[in-house]
Amino acid sequence: MGLFLFSDPLFGVWNWVDAIIRIVIVVLVMTLVVMYLTYGERKLVARFQQRLGPTKTGPAGLLQAFADTVKLAAKEDIRPTNADRWVFEFAPYLTFIPVLMVLISLPFARDWGVRDLSLGLFYVFAILGLNIVGMLMAGLGSGNKYALLGGVRAAAQMISYEIPLVLSLLSVAMIAGTLNLNGIAAIQSFTPEEGQFAPFIFLQPLAFLIFFTAMLSELHRAPFDIPVAESEIVGGYFVEYSGMRWSMFQLTEYASMWAFSVFGSIVFFGGWAVPDTGSWVGPDWAWQLGITFVKSVAWIVAIMWVRTTVPRLRIDQLMSFCWKILLPMSIVQLLMNGFILIYDWPHILLTLTSGAGAAALVAIIITRAIRRPKNKLVGTYRQARAAAQ
Amino acid sequence: MTVWPEERAQTIDSFNTVDMTINVGPQHPATHGVFRMVLTVDGEVVVDCEPYIGYLHRGLEKLTENHDYRQSMGWWDRTDYLAGMCCEGAYCMAVEKLAGLEVPERAEYIRVMMMELSRINSHFMFLGAFGADVGSFGTSFVYAWRERERIYDFFEEVSGDRMFPTYFRPGGLQADLPENYESRVRWLLGSIRQGIEDLDGLLTGNEIFVERCRGLAPMTTERAINLGITGPILRATGLPWDLRKAQPYSVYDRMKFEIPVGEQGDIFDRYFVRLSEMYQSTKIIEQCLDQMPKGLVLNPDLPKTLRIDNAECYIRTEGTKGEYGVYAMARGGVKPYRMKLRSPSFCNLSALREMVVGSYVADAIIILGSLDIVLGEVDK
């Protein structure tokens, strides 16, 4: 029983008017969320680093995001002379629009979304892939070598990590039996009479780990912030941007972080599914919104925590981790799921196989870290000469 | 990972790829000052590296030759500006040796204590900045900064300045320590040890950090010696060469400490040698506190104006980056005739090209970081 505002169509208007109104609402909410995500990240990271973060603008620095927005809007929009004009100017929009389009399909509570797509999961990862185009355009069009390196790195990284990301989501979709995000969330709600489904993180811990890793990579967050590495290529593909176009990239970054956290919490944590909300005080949608909020905040905090703790991988380590570890494991998991589901074996087997896989993944990472270095040493001139002779 | 000249030539023929030059610096977050290097890259692999220095050249040696012995103290702080006291110490020792001045024992102990605090300070800076180079989003930086602030606070209390204390004088010290110094320093040592442990946990305990550093840009002892490399980078190759033990100056011969060495001279060893050295420095400071005699801190026979007749000397000290040597020559008068600084950062930097060529762009940055150069010292 959704609120009538969001039961379709809105006030009985035409379908497309209803869609536009909803999109406008989502965009406004997203802007606010992004502003407070930047504030929240600064505050949280500051606490991790024994600092205070913004304190001066408004109470506890709460208005800092508005001050930043005003500053960015007032800044000059500089285009380098050797930039490719149209490529350079359209790149921010092409990175931002896919993220906005992802938000269309996300249910923030039951039936609270722009559109309830029956192929929602498929739609999300189909659209997210488009993001790369904008980044590559920014990298190529800026006429800057750092930006070029960043753009190419971003493309290589995102194409690679898309595959384990999609495969891990597919293994969840196999169990859920639907690609509808509302359906996936509903199936994870704990209702004894409808068969007891737990959140998919318990059924598919390996898929969760792979998804979280690949998500960090898609978001260009540490330890996979290679395309935007500050200490190497000074920001990567958006190094030449300024003013509003630069803030479009920031908007993209934080909006996609938010979109991913909501999406991830729907797929793995059960999204808006509240345990048996019928007997609770207050309207269902409020509880559902609240639980979505809590889950996505937990997700975002985890992302930021990782960011403040770990250093950056090198590009070859990143690639080998994706192709040699994540991809085989996600394929094996997909196969196991297929066997278990087609022969209708008990669901506990899903947990066991995937849990074993998750343990193996963690074990691989740890053993990789503690093994002795091989004889293949990196980066000496003499060795290069020896190889040449 | 190597450069493959034959394969690269083939690549150029069939795909028509070209190498790209990237300018890194002088304004770049990873160059630690105004250092510039031009990398030639083949995709992500560095095939050539050309360093450019001199952006911070201030004519230290000539300035010193044109000033009174005591006037030019402040210039020497600004060579290795992360460890000003170590540079002051070397300069003062050179002048004292020229003039044949005695330094009171208490002053020697205070000098050693201050130099070791400076060393810790500088190594903290390395750990923090190196963590940031490897990509840990400034967390290591801020952890290191906490301890550095406390050390600087102590310096300020002692000498009136934080980075450039100008606390030493030829023949002793500018002033005695404040009364509560012992409790202050002991508290500081506890805090420093906590800071070292925190950074150790944050960096050494991190798989990604270790993966990035291990086996990268190794250096053999022979090669390091041939290149004139000294300090932690030389010790990381396995040679326990530390001037504080090899040719003890000041009161280092009365101190008990160990020289940490690495095994294969790779970046992880360099990092770990510096980390271990900080523990040793805290030990030295504790011994200084225990053995500190009472007395004067400035030679009472010091003339109002230092006039030195024909004399010549070379002072080698173990600076934070390596052998910090001062060659001084006097031909009478109030000014030195010739002053020459053998700066460790400059010599260590000469290994950069050899290490960087063949590595990835990302590694080039951390190789530069692992050399721990200070541009004030490179450019003099």
Image: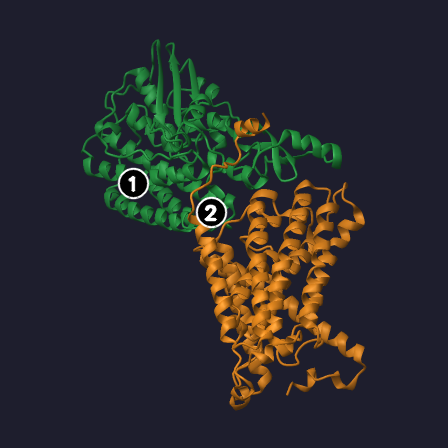
Chain colours: A orange, B green
* SS type, badge 2: helix
Quick check: A101 left or right of B112? Answer: right
Q: Quadrant of residue B251 in the image? A: top left
Relative image position of residue A295 (x, y in whole percent): 53, 72
**Residue at (65, 60) in percent of width and height:** A251
**Looking at the image, is mark 2 or mark 1 earlier in the sequence?**
2
Q: Which residue is mark 1?
A: B282
Q: Is residue A142 left or right of residue A289?
A: right
Q: Residue furthest front?
A: A343
Q: Are marks 2 and 1 on the same chain?
A: yes
* B239 lies above or below A202: above
Instruction: Give the side of residue A127 with respect to residue B366, left or right.
Output: right
Amino acid carrying mark 1 in the image: Thr
Picture layout, residue A289 above or below residue B335 = below
Distance CA(mark 2)–CA(mark 1): 25 Å
Mark 1 chain: B
Is residue A239 at least partly visible in the picture? no
Tag 2 residue: B209
Q: Residues within 10 Å of mark 1 (few under 14, many from 20)?
A: many
**Residue B14, percent from left and from top:** 75, 35
Whole-percent x, y for residue A241 in the image: 69, 49
- Front residue of A351/B133: it is A351
Indicate the amino acid at tag 2. Answer: Phe
